[in-house]
Amino acid sequence: MNKERKLIIAGNWKMNKTVTEATDLVAALDRDLGAQTEVDVVVSPPFTALDAVSKLLKNSLIKVGAQNMSEKGYGAFTGEINAGMLRDLRVHYVILGHSERREYQKETNALINTKTKAALAADLKPIVCVGETLEQREANDTESVVGEQIAGSLSGLEAEQIKDTIIAYEPVWAIGTGKTASSEQAQEVHAYIRGEIAKIHGPETAQTVRIQYGGSVKPENAQELLSQPDIDGALVGGASLESRGFSDIINSTRN
């Protein structure tokens, strides 16, 4: 697949997999993918499996991501895990602002912005999630909602920091529902996001930023979605919990 930017496909395992199940999955995935270098591949296990997975993938091209992190440094913050701790576990990426955290943990754009800056300061690559609900789409508010999330979550970042940040557009109505935005709908929002970045940082910087699509990505729809000019990868949920399905999504980019 001939793309302007290198594709990045990340698996978000959410609250799934024991340590044993996690290591079995990445061992199979590493065998299935072999030494492919065309796509950046990331797996994001739960915190409990990060150490075991990162050790197993030490010499692999597959990189490890975390599903969240605290914006705080070290100190009296019971139950939290910060960027330095993730780096110590050989984590390279961290998912921030996922819609489930925006909904259930009431995370705001301002908090996500603080977390993004903390991740970048620790040399982690943030995957910043944005997306609208079904009600917002039906009210024709997609651009205003996503634009506000982009502006708030990425506020104050320098151009070089933006280049190290991945944005994941995940329409909330398509996450885990089996519904998927059409390739045309997804492309339209991705192009809008790139345009918003260009307004702040200029078109040259905007053209370097990778924007993933997430929301019921499966082997059956991956190729069509990823062939769109402004879609630079996928943030995969349920389909990343099984080696063959996740490998098929990655391998679809070779066609």
Image (cartoon, grey):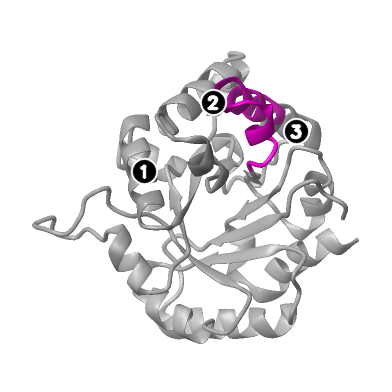
The first of marks 1 and 3 along the sequence is 1
Instruction: Identify the residue shown where x is 91% and y is 61%.
Output: 255
Of the two numbered discs 2 and 1 on the same chain, state the one appearing first in sequence.
Answer: 1
Q: Looking at this rendering, what residue extends furthest in the left direction? A: 76
Residue at 33% over, 55% down: 69
Q: Are dots 2 and 3 in contact, CB under 8 Å? A: no
**Is residue 57 shown left or right of residue 87?**
right
- Which image quarter: residue 205? top right
Residue type, mark 2 in image: Val
Marks 2 and 1, how far apart in space? 19 Å
> Dot 2, how many residues are within 10 Å of its Cα: few (below 14), some (14-19), or many (20+)?
many
**Tag 1: residue type?**
Lys
Among numbered discs 2 and 3, the one appearing first in the sequence: 2
What residue is disc 3 on? 187
Question: From what the image shows, is residue 28 above or below residue 148?
Answer: below
Taking the spot 48% from the left edge, 43% from the top edge, the residue there is 161
Q: Which residue is mark 2?
A: 146
Q: Residues within 10 Å of mark 3 (few under 14, many from 20)?
A: many
* Residue type highlighted by circle 3: Gln
Q: Nearer the viewer, residue 198 or 218?
A: 198
The percent position of residue 222, horizontal first and vertical second, equals: 77, 53
Name the foreground residue: 50 vs 18: 50
In the picture, measured across the screen, residue 20 lies left or right of residue 142, that is: left
| Residue at numbered disc 1 | 117
| Residue 74 screen position, x and y as percent | 16, 59
Residue 71 lies in the magenta-colored region:
no
Image: magenta residue range: 191-209
